[in-house]
Image: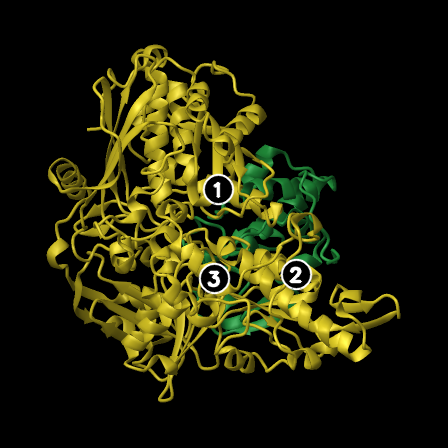
C-alpha cells in the first residue's frame, strides 16, 4: 500500500472525530488533544528531520542514519533506537520487529538502544510528547517505524543498484544483504552504508502487505530475554559510577507535610555514613553503600510539620466523595436520548486507592557538576525528568543529560518524574555522583496512587429486563487536570475519568454519563495506575451489567450476547471466550462460580471469564481464567499472550488484595507484608485466545488488567450470591451462610444491600 | 574483614557484621544481578544460593555466611539445574520487566536441584516466596516443568532468532 506523507497522516488523525479519537483509549484520549497538526511536526517521523544529525553524531556518527531510529555502521549489528521505553511490555521487541520487517534484517542482527530525551525525534504522536504509556506504543509507531525501515531499505537498495548499474527493482534484500540475483552480486548493508547515506530520501515507499510479513504476526522471542535471565540487564538501580555514593530518603509521611528538624548526631556517628542532606520535605542519608545509608536513616530523629492533612483518613475521603456524588456539580460527558419511565435499578460502587509496587523501587542517580547535571534513571517520561531536574538545579535544560535505563516495572508509576527531581535536589548539595534509592517502604508511602472513585450507576429496564437507558455518575479526583491540564475537555471533563463508561459496547438507545470532580486534599497526589480509566470503569459497568442480567433472570453470557448483536467484533471475542471456556449456565459445584466481563479498552476488544471457588471462610481461590482478544493485527503473538496473562493477573491481584489506606494523613501500607500482591501459589491457569484480525493494532499493555476485576466480582457473585460493590474483595462478606446461599438463587439488586 | 567465596572466587570485603549479603554483593563486590525488592524477605528478588540452598540475601547478615559457597545469578548457568532453568526461561520467554527474574531463576534452580520432577505443589512451595509484579507466574510454572521434563510445556513456539527477513 502507499503511505501518505507523515504530516497528512498525523493531521488526519488529529482531525478525526471525537469518537474515533476515543477508540485510542487510555492516556491517549487525554493526550490526543495535545498532538494536533501544529505539534505533529515535532513528533517522531519516519523521515530525517532537523535534529537527526546531532542525534546521530551522539550515536557515534554512523555512515547511514536515515532517521532517528536506524543506525547502520560499516560492520556490527544494525542499531535501532527505541522510541518507547521497556518496562516489561516487550515494546523493544515489537518496535524492532516493525523496523526489521521493512528494513530487511533478522532479529539476531540488531542491537537495541535507549532513546535520549528528545520529543522532536521520539515523541509519541498519540500522547503529544516523549511518554510511554496508555498502551499506545504500537498504535503510535505501527506506521512510522515500518515506514522508517522501508525508507532505509530503499536507500540501501538504491546505493547497491547505482554501484552495479542495475534497476533497483531487480534487487532483493534478505538479512541485511542486498542481492542482485541475475548477476549474482551481493552487498551487505554495512558495506553500502556510506553510499546510502549520501542518497536522497525516497518520496514514497511501498510497505509490505500483511500476508508478506516474515516477522510481524509470528511469535518472536523478546530481544531483552537473554540478558534478563543472566542478571546482566542494567536497571536504574544497578548504575555504578566512579566515586558514587548511595543515599536513601525519608519524606514527610503525611501528605503535603514538611521537614521541621532533624537530629542526625547518631546517624553521622555510624560507620559508612557520609552525609545527611535536607530538602523542604525530605531528608536523605548518604552512605558508602546502601546499608550504611539505611542504618543512618533509621538512626535519625526527625520532626515533621504534618501540615493540613495531619488528621486525614481514608474514611474522610470516602465520605467526601459520597457527599460530592449527591451534591456536587455533575458535568455531562455524553448524553443520548432521554431517560424513559420504567423500572429503575440504581446502585453504588466504590474503588480504593492503589499503589504500584513496581519490583524495582524508585531510584535515580544524579551527578551535578559546574558544567551540568547527568541523570541515570528508568523513566516513562524522559523529557519531563529533564525539565524537573532543570528546575531543581536551576540549570538550563541544555545542561541536563539523561541516560534512560531498563525499567523494573512501570505500571504508570514511572510516568511521574518526582524521583528525578528529588534526587537532583539532593545531588546538587554534593560533589560526587549520588544514587538515591527509595526503600520499599518509601516507595509505597510516597507512591502517587490510583485515585478512589464513588460511582452511582443505573439503568431503566424493559419488561424483559433489557436496559433501555444507561446512567453513570462517576465521582473522583482528576489525574489529567494535574498531569496534562490542556488535555481536559472544554466543558471540564477529565476524559480518563469516564473512559469505557461513556462509550460502552452494548446497544442501549439512551444514556447519560456524568462526572463529578472532587479534588483530593492538597498534597495528596493521585496518578496513573495500569489501565487507569478503563480499569476503574469496566469494573463498575461490567459488574452492573451482570447485576442486570441476574435481575432479569438471564444467563450473563446470553444477556450480553443479546446486547452485542450490532457489535460483531466484540461479540466475536465474547463467543470465543465462552467457547474456549466451555461456558455452562450452572456452576459446577457449590461455592464455585464463573464470571464473565467484556469491554473495549485501549482500542482492543477483550473478554475474560474467571472461575473461582470461595471457601466457607470467605477465601477466594482462582481456579481458571480464559481471555479472548481482538487486538487488530498482532505484531508479536508471544507478547499478546504474555501481556494478557500478566495484565489479567495484575488486575486480579489488585482486586483481590490491594488498597492503600490513610491515617493521620499518611499511607498506612509500606511493604509486601501489608500490601499483599498475588503469588504463584494463588495463580490460576490463564489461557489466551485471539481473534485473527487485519484491523489496525489495538493496545495490549493494560487490556488484561482492565477486564480482570469485573470477571472476578461476577464469578464471586455466581459462587456466593454476594455482589461486591467495592474493592478489594472483602472476605468477611463471603463467609458462608444460609442467607448468602439463598441469594444465589433469587438474587436481585433490589433486595441486596448497597454499599454502606 | 570477611572472606567470601562467591561464584567460585574468593573475595575479601570490609563490611559491618550486620550488613546483609545483598548489599555486600551489590555495593561492595559489584554483582548487581541480585536485586533489592523489599528488604524483609517478602519478595525473593534477592535470592542467592548458599551451598546450593536458596536464601534471601536481603536479611542474611554477612557475619552468618561463614565458609559456605555463595552462588549468584551471574554464575548459576554453570550448574546443571541453573543451565536447564535458564534455557527453559528462554524457550518459553518468561521474562517481562525482568527485575524479579534473577530471584525467580535462583529459587527455581534450587528447586530443580533437589526435586528433579517437581509437582505443582512443589513449585508452589518453592516459588511462593518470589513475587513478580508483571505476574509471569503462568510461564514460570511452565518453564520449571519444561526444565524438569525436557518436554515442551506450552503451545507457543518461539521463532528462532535467525528467522529470515
> Where is A104 relative to A23, above or below?
below
The residue most toward the right is: A183
Label 1: state its secondary structure.
loop
Kindly identify which residue carries mark 2.
A102
Are callouts 2 and 1 both on one chain? yes
Query: Which quadrant: the N terminus of chain A?
Result: bottom right
* Label 3 or label 1, whichever comes before in sequence order: 3
Judge whether residue A722 can be spotted in this image.
Answer: no
Q: Earlier in the sequence, mark 2 or mark 3?
A: 3
Q: Secondary structure at mark 2?
A: helix
Q: Nearer the viewer, residue A556 or A493?
A: A493
- What color does chain B have in the rendering? green
Q: Which mark is nearer the camera, 2 or 1? A: 2
Q: Compared with residue A695, is residue A38 higher up or lower down, i.e. above or below? A: below
Residue at image location 77% in from the left, 68% down from the top: A177
Residue B119 vertical position relative to residue A416 in the rendered view, above or below: above
Q: Residue at x 27, y 19 (%)?
A: A749
Chain A tint in image: yellow
Q: Chain of mark 3?
A: A
Same chain, labels 2 and 3:
yes
Disc 2 to disc 3, how far (Cα)?
21 Å
Q: Nearer the viewer, mark 3 or mark 1?
A: 3
Q: Which residue is mark 1?
A: A604
Tell whether A458 sits left or right of A216. Answer: left
Q: Residues within 10 Å of mark 2 (few under 14, many from 20)?
A: many
Q: Quadrant of the rendered structure where residue A368 is?
A: bottom left
Pointer 3 residue: A8
Q: Which quadrant is the C terminus of chain A positioned in?
A: top left
Amino acid at each position: 500500500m502507499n503511505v501518505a506523507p507523515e504530516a497528512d497522516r498525523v493531521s488526519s488523525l488529529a482531525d478525526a472525530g471525537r469518537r474515533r479519537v476515543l477508540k485510542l483509549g487510555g492516556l491517549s484520549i487525554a493526550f490526543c488533544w495535545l498532538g494536533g497538526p501544529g505539534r505533529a511536526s515535532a513528533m517522531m517521523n519516519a523521515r530525517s528531520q532537523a535534529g537527526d544529525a546531532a542525534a546521530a553524531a551522539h550515536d557515534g556518527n554512523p555512515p547511514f542514519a536515515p532517521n532517528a531510529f536506524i543506525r547502520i555502521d560499516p560492520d556490527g549489528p544494525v542499531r535501532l533506537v527505541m522510541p518507547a521505553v521497556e518496562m516489561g511490555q516487550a515494546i523493544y521487541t515489537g518496535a524492532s520487529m516493525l523496523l526489521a520487517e521493512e528494513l530487511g534484517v533478522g532479529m539476531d542482527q540488531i542491537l537495541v538502544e535507549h532513546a535520549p530525551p528528545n520529543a522532536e525525534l521520539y515523541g509519541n504522536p498519540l500522547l503529544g510528547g516523549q511518554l510511554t504509556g496508555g498502551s499506545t506504543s504500537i498504535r503510535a509507531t505501527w506506521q512510522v517505524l515500518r515506514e522508517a525501515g522501508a525508507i532505509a531499505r530503499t536507500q540501501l537498495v538504491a546505493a547497491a543498484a547505482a554501484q552495479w548499474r542495475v534497476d533497483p527493482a531487480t534487487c532483493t534484500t534478505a538479512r541485511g544483504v542486498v542481492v542482485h540475483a541475475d548477476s549474482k552480486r551481493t552487498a551487505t548493508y554495512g558495506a553500502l552504508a556510506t553510499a546510502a547515506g549520501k542518497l536522497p530520501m525516497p518520496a514514497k515507499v511501498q510497505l509490505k502487505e500483511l500476508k508478506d510479513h516474515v516477522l510481524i504476526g509470528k511469535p518472536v522471542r523478546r530481544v531483552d530475554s537473554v540478558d534478563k535471565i543472566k542478571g546482566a540487564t542494567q536497571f536504574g538501580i544497578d548504575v555504578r559510577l566512579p566515586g558514587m555514593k548511595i543515599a536513601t530518603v525519608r519524606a514527610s509521611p503525611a501528605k503535603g507535610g514538611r521537614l521541621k528538624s532533624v537530629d542526625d548526631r547518631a546517624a553521622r556517628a555510624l560507620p559508612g555514613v557520609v552525609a545527611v542532606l535536607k530538602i523542604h520535605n525530605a531528608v536523605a542519608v548518604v552512605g558508602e553503600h546502601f546499608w550504611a545509608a539505611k542504618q543512618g536513616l533509621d538512626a535519625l530523629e526527625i520532626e515533621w510539620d504534618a501540615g493540613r492533612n495531619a488528621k486525614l483518613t481514608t474514611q474522610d475521603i470516602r465520605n467526601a466523595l459520597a457527599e460530592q456524588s449527591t451534591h456536587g456539580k455533575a458535568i455531562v460527558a455524553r448524553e443520548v436520548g432521554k431517560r424513559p419511565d420504567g423500572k429503575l435499578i440504581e446502585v453504588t460502587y466504590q474503588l480504593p486507592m492503589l499503589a504500584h509496587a513496581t519490583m524495582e523501587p524508585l531510584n535515580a542517580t544524579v551527578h551535578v557538576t559546574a558544567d551540568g547535571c547527568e541523570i541515570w534513571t528508568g523513566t516513562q517520561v524522559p523529557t519531563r525528568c529533564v525539565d524537573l531536574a532543570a528546575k531543581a538545579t536551576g540549570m538550563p535544560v541544555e545542561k541536563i543529560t539523561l541516560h534512560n535505563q531498563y525499567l523494573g516495572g512501570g505500571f504508570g508509576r514511572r510516568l511521574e518524574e518526582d524521583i528525578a527531581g528529588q534526587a537532583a535536589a539532593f545531588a546538587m548539595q554534593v560533589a560526587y555522583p549520588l544514587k538515591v534509592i527509595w526503600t520499599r517502604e518509601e516507595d509505597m508511602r510516597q507512591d502517587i496512587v490510583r485515585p478512589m472513585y464513588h460511582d452511582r450507576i443505573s439503568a431503566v429496564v424493559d419488561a424483559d429486563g433489557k436496559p433501555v437507558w444507561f446512567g453513570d455518575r462517576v465521582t473522583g479526583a482528576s489525574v489529567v487536570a494535574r498531569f496534562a491540564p490542556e488535555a481536559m475537555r472544554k466543558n471540564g471533563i477529565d476524559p480518563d475519568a469516564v473512559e469505557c463508561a461513556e462509550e460502552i459496547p452494548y446497544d442501549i438507545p439512551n444514556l447519560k454519563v456524568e462526572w463529578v470532580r472532587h479534588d483530593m486534599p492538597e498534597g495528596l497526589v493521585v496518578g496513573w495506575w495500569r489501565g487507569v480509566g478503563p480499569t476503574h470503569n469496566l469494573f463498575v459497568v461490567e459488574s452492573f451489567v451482570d447485576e442486570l442480567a441476574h435481575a432479569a433472570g438471564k444467563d450473563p453470557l446470553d444477556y450480553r450476547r443479546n446486547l452485542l448483536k450490532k457489535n460483531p467484533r466484540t461479540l466475536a471475542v465474547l463467543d470465543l471466550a465462552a467457547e474456549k471456556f466451555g461456558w455452562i449456565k450452572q456452576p459446577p459445584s457449590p461455592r464455585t462460580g464463573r464470571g464473565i466481563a467484556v469491554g473495549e479498552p485501549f482500542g482492543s476488544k477483550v473478554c475474560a471469564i474467571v472461575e473461582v471457588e470461595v471457601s466457607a471462610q470467605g477465601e477466594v481461590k482462582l481456579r481458571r481464567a480464559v481471555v479472548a482478544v481482538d487486538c487488530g493485527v498482532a505484531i508479536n503473538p508471544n507478547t499478546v499472550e504474555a501481556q494478557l496473562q500478566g495484565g489479567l493477573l495484575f488486575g486480579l491481584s489488585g482486586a483481590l488484595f490491594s488498597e492503600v489506606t490513610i491515617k493521620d494523613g499518611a499511607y498506612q501500607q509500606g511493604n509486601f507484608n501489608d500490601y499483599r500482591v498475588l503469588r504463584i501459589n494463588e495463580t490460576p491457569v490463564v489461557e489466551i485466545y485471539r481473534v485473527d484480525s487485519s484491523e489496525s493494532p489495538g493496545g495490549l499493555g493494560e487490556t488484561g488488567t482492565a477486564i480482570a476485576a469485573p470477571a472476578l466480582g461476577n464469578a464471586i457473585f455466581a459462587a456466593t450470591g454476594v455482589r461486591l460493590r467495592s474493592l478489594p474483595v472483602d472476605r468477611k462478606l463471603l463467609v458462608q451462610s444460609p442467607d448468602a446461599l439463598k441469594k444465589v438463587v433469587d438474587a436481585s439488586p433490589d433486595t441486596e444491600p448497597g454499599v454502606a | 574483614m570477611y572472606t567470601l567465596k562467591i561464584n567460585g572466587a574468593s573475595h575479601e570485603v570490609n563490611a559491618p557484621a550486620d550488613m546483609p549479603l545483598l548489599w555486600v554483593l551489590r555495593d561492595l563486590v559489584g554483582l548487581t544481578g541480585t536485586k533489592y525488592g523489599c528488604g524483609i524477605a517478602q519478595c525473593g528478588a534477592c535470592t542467592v544460593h548458599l551451598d546450593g540452598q536458596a536464601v534471601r540475601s536481603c536479611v542474611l547478615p554477612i557475619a552468618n555466611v561463614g565458609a559456605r559457597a555463595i552462588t549468584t545469578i551471574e554464575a548459576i548457568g554453570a550448574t546443571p539445574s541453573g543451565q536447564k532453568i535458564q534455557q527453559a526461561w528462554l524457550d518459553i520467554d518468561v521474562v517481562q520487566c525482568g527485575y524479579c527474574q534473577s530471584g525467580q531463576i535462583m529459587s527455581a534452580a534450587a528447586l530443580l536441584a533437589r526435586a528433579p520432577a517437581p509437582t505443582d505443589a512443589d513449585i508452589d512451595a518453592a516459588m511462593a516466596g518470589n513475587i513478580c509484579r508483571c505476574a509471569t507466574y503462568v510461564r514460570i510454572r511452565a518453564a520449571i516443568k519444561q526444565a524438569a521434563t525436557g518436554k515442551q510445556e506450552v503451545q507457543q513456539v518461539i521463532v528462532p532468532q535467525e528467522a529470515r527477513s
